[in-house]
Amino acid sequence: MTAATNLRTLFENKYPGKDRIFEELIKPIFDKAKDATLTDNQQLSESDKRLVKSFSIIAQVRGGFPITFADVELKDTVALKRSRVAIQNCVRKIMTNDSSAIIFFHFTDNTKDWRVSFVNKGDSGKDSTNAKRYTYLCGVNHGCRTIAERFNALAKLHCSSCPFCQKINLHP
């Protein structure tokens, strides 16, 4: 079984939980990632609490291209397929300018669909990623070839001579 197949299997099942996401997805690709799965939940505004039950950090990678990995548990009333912008905005409000995050959105029971989104917040809206791009529905009812390929491409970049890996401080 190839790495891409393993990743696709991960994405085409129920949400595995933030511990397994860290161990099987983040840590193998970003070996300098700092485990933050035991940190406290992030504070949310009252309006965001209508959509989000909890928001916590899974891991962080420091360096020239810092990135945060976040776990967002949604309320059962959220329409995950249609709420890309609304649920991402909850996280974007907390992010600082010139920061990036990969966010895992899921429900409490972890059996429904879940979403993975890459978010970059620039100095202005023009410099930030569009909330409708780089976001992928995952779960039992979804073919997850594209997102598996994206993460597999990151894994292939994992080498000491690669400028990308040097930029995000994967290697000293």
Image (cartoon, rainbow, N blue to C red):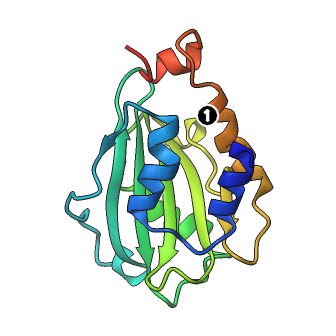
> Is residue 116 among the parts visible in the rendering?
yes
Q: Position of residue 47 (x, y in %)?
A: 36, 77
Please tell me how crowded label 1 is: few (under 14), some (14-19), or many (20+) other residues with Cα within 10 Å.
some
> Is residue 137 or residue 52 the one in the foreground?
137
Q: Position of residue 112 (x, y in %)?
A: 60, 83
- Kindly indicate the quadrant of the structure image that contains residue 49: bottom left
> Is residue 105 or residue 27 the one in the foreground?
27
Element assignment for label 1 = helix
- Extreme front residue here? 1
Please name the residue that numbered disc 1 is placed on.
155
Residue type at mark 1: give it.
Answer: Ala
The structure residue drawn at horizontal position 47% and vertical position 86%, both measured from the top left corner, is 109
> Is residue 96 among the parts visible in the rendering?
no
Q: For the image shown, how many numbered marks are present on the structure?
A: 1
The structure residue drawn at horizontal position 58% and vertical position 59%, both measured from the top left corner, is 116
The structure residue drawn at horizontal position 37% and vertical position 74%, both measured from the top left corner, is 48
Horizontal side, residue 40 vs residue 67: left or right = left
- Kindly indicate the quadrant of the structure image that contains residue 115: bottom right
Give the vertical position of 78 relative to 43 (above or below).
below
